[in-house]
Image (cartoon, rainbow, N blue to C red):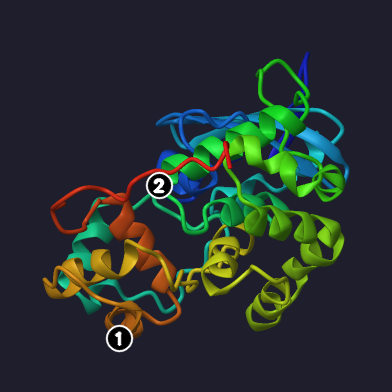
């Protein structure tokens, strides 16, 4: 990966060693079409982030067999150094046996560029995951957008993005500051407590998977589901399973066993032959929208802003 100074920001070019599906690889980092911190296209992505060196914004584009990136801000060098990990260049597929099940084998052939990326940014994965607890995706995305607009800052460079809120600012907010964005006291307190321990939580990137999960789950309000959501995004854990998810058990059961409904125990049973790469199976199934046909109404959205 070579670096060259650009007229505005720093540019780098990365040669790809195998196919990359940029959209599907980065999609877990994107919190919907209204995400102020990120925009995502089929072969382009724009993202704002905080690094140990300071804030940064990065523009990424696929160009044949190369990935071209340009970054701005004090953290430009750091975000560019982390680009290979973010797009899954170091995604370890040792022990991956998609031929264990014909559905997974077919998806693996059809989606060869889907990788498990790693950002190393724990709080940037943890805060949205907390907001997503026990609510619909639409509610969570709306709350995240409101949080960033109200308490984030403009990102460096010309991309028009906003930075995720600084953890120190989140920790200092009163719980009722979260009410206008649809977040009740329980989740607000979890965000505030986690933000007050941000440095300690960011250090989990250097721990084993078991140690990192234990530290994350020591925060009241952070359970197995939330810890797994962080692990797959921040740590690039190919085996993290979000136990307690509303949709995943039925997604897995339908794709792997033709069963319309399942619980967590049945999901884990079906995923067991893929241990070591269970998150990879889930990513393939989600990318292919391999769940059962919908019957009945979706989970209703709620508003607590007026409570």
Residue 128 appears left or right of 50: left
Residue 186 visible? The answer is: yes
Against 173, is 226 above or below?
below
Give how far across and how far down residue 119 sits, in percent. Answer: 65, 52
Q: In the image, is 78 to the left or to the right of 138?
A: right
x%, y% of residue 138?
43, 40
Q: Considering the numbered disc 1 on the image, is that residue within a helix, a strand or a loop?
A: helix
Q: Dot 1: within a 10 Å radius of its alpha carbon, few (fewer than 14), some, or many (20 or more) residues?
A: few
Residue visible at 40% across and 52% down? 114
In the figure, 70 relative to 50: above or below? above
Residue marked by disc 2: 19
Q: Position of residue 276 (x, y in %)?
A: 45, 79
Residue behind mark 1? 269
Q: Residues within 10 Å of mark 2 (few under 14, many from 20)?
A: few
Residue found at x 32% / y 76%: 97
* The quadrant where residue 200 appears: bottom right
Residue, x 38% and y 59% (percent of image)? 283
Q: Left or right? Give the position of 27 relative to 262.
A: right
The residue closer to the viewer here, 306 or 264, is 306
Could you tell me how far apart the alpha carbons at marks 2 and 1 are, in whole angstroms? Answer: 31 Å
**Nearer-the-camera pick, 63 or 143:** 143
- Tell me if residue 64 comes above or below residue 26 in the rendering: above
Q: Residue at x 43, y 68 (%)?
A: 279
Camera-side residue of 234 and 307: 307
In this picture, is 95 found above or below 301?
below
């Amino acid at each position: 990966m070579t670096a060259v100074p650009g007229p505005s920001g720093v540019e780098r070019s990365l040669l790809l060693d195998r196919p990359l599906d940029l959209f599907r690889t980065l999609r877990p980092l994107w919190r919907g079409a209204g995400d102020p911190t990120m925009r995502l296209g089929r072969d382009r992505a724009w993202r704002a982030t905080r690094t140990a060196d300071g804030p940064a914004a990065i523009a990424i584009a696929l160009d044949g067999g190369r990935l071209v990136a340009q970054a701005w801000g004090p953290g430009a060098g750091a975000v560019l150094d982390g680009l290979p990990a973010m797009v899954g260049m170091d995604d370890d597929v040792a022990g991956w046996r998609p031929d264990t099940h014909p559905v997974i084998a077919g998806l693996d052939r059809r989606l060869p560029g889907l990788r498990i990326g790693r950002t190393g940014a724990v709080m940037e994965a943890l805060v949205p995951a907390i907001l997503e607890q026990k609510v619909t995706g639409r509610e969570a995305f709306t709350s995240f957008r409101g949080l960033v607009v109200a308490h984030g800052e403009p990102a460096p460079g010309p991309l028009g993005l906003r930075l995720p809120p600084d953890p120190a600012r989140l920790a200092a907010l009163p719980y009722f500051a979260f009410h206008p964005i649809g977040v009740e006291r329980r989740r607000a307190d979890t965000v505030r407590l986690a933000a007050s321990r941000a440095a300690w939580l960011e250090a989990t990137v250097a721990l084993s998977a078991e140690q990192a999960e234990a530290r994350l789950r020591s925060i009241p309000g952070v359970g197995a589901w939330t810890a797994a959501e962080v692990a797959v995004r921040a740590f690039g854990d190919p085996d993290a399973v979000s136990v307690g998810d509303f949709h995943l058990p039925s997604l897995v059961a339908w794709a792997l066993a033709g069963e319309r409904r399942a619980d967590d125990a049945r999901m884990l049973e079906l995923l067991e032959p893929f241990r070591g790469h269970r998150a990879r199976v889930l990513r393939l199934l989600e990318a292919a929208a391999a769940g059962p046909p919908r019957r009945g109404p979706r989970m209703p959205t709620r508003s607590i802003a007026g409570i």
